Image (cartoon, rainbow, N blue to C red):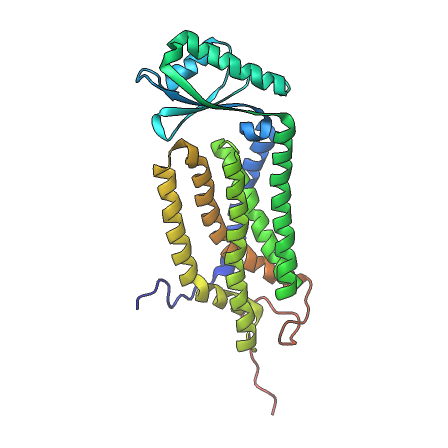
Amino acid sequence: MFRFFDKADYDFLSIRKPALNFALLFMIPGLLLLAIRGVNQSIEFTGGTLIELTAKSDDINTARLRSTLDAAGITAPEITTFGAPNEFIIRARLDPRAEVTEATTQETAAAIDAAFRNAFGADQYEIVRTEAIGPTVAGELRQKAILAILMGFAAIFLYLSIRMEWRFAIAAVVATLHDILSALAFLSYLNIEVTLAVATALLFIVGYSVNDTIVTFDRVRENLHKFKRKNLYEILNRSINETLPRTVVTSGTTVAATLAWVILGGEVLRGFAMVMTFGIITGTFSSIFIASPILHLVEQRWPGEDVRGARAFSGGPTVVQSPAK
């Protein structure tokens, strides 16, 4: 049966420095931009008012809704279609600079309803639901999202430290941290709104990245037993090449599914799907070009006994000398 990269034999570790430089060149400008501009947080994290509206006239569209709200003094509303073309989700605040309270969210909902009633007439639309998210709820959601990601890192380190060794755990955590920071830079470059769905995608990145890394590290552990006369540099390259068919097929099929969401999912799913797609790509990259080189670096810096009882892996090809006669 045909397999992709069935007999792959690439020296991935030889390009670890250019790969790391590429990762830094992508991350650093994006994170600086994020620090300057701030996170484009959705109403779920900032607080405000969400309205689901169904239009009964074909004349009501996103452009008319936005111009109506602008004319009423409700600036920078977020308007997206939801489901059918005549269904809209509107997120807005009366004054984006003002502190959000329960009272201001109710005032925003009343002002939006009044603006549409004056512009279209009460019989031309229907407000299906109105949700007011206060600052307490928004702050709690933000804290829980951050806490969930930090707990994920802690669980990864603990699991790998017990199952393998703390050096493997450090390499996996660094690779996963790279994926999260790269995803934040990606959000910054495209100014993607951070919603609860996007926060979920970030958690997915943590899980996907560490799963891909563990597959490689499991093969590394097996090969440490199997090839006792090879050094870590060679074993890491061999293990990456042996798991490459699985990596390519898994990542390729998953990216195909998330790309379908990006293209066909509409505005509601697009941000989530874009972050998911990027996370799969960067997770695959980090498992090959970040996790394994970091493991090699950590072993060089803090050598210790591996599962074979050997110490201090060397960094280059193995040279086996014949015993003296």
- Image position of 221 with respect to 196: above or below: below
| Above-or-below relation of 22 to 193 | below
Residue at the top extreme of this rendering: 118
The one nearer the camera, 293 or 46, is: 46
Query: At 60% across and 57% down in the image, what residue appears?
Result: 171
Q: Is residue 234 left or right of residue 100?
A: left
Q: Residue at x 60, y 16 (%)?
A: 104
Q: Is residue 95 visible?
A: no
Image quadrant occupied by the C terminus: bottom right
Choose between 102 and 233: the one closer to the eye.
102
**Position of residue 114 measured from the top left corner of the image (x, y, whole percent):** 47, 10
Q: Residue at x 58, y 19 (%)?
A: 105
User: Would residue 82 appear left or right of 135 to someone viewing this image?
Assistant: left
| Residue 319 screen position, x and y as percent | 55, 76
Name the one closer to the observer, 261 or 32.
261
| Residue at x-position 48% and y-position 14% | 112
Q: How many marks?
A: 0
The answer to whether residue 307 of the structure is visible from this angle is yes
* In the image, farthest residue toward the bottom: 325
- Residue 248: percent from left, percent from top: 40, 57
Image location (x, y in percent) of residue 184:
54, 39
Where 114 falls versus 219 (above or below)? above
Q: On the rendered image, what quadrant is the N terminus found in?
A: bottom left
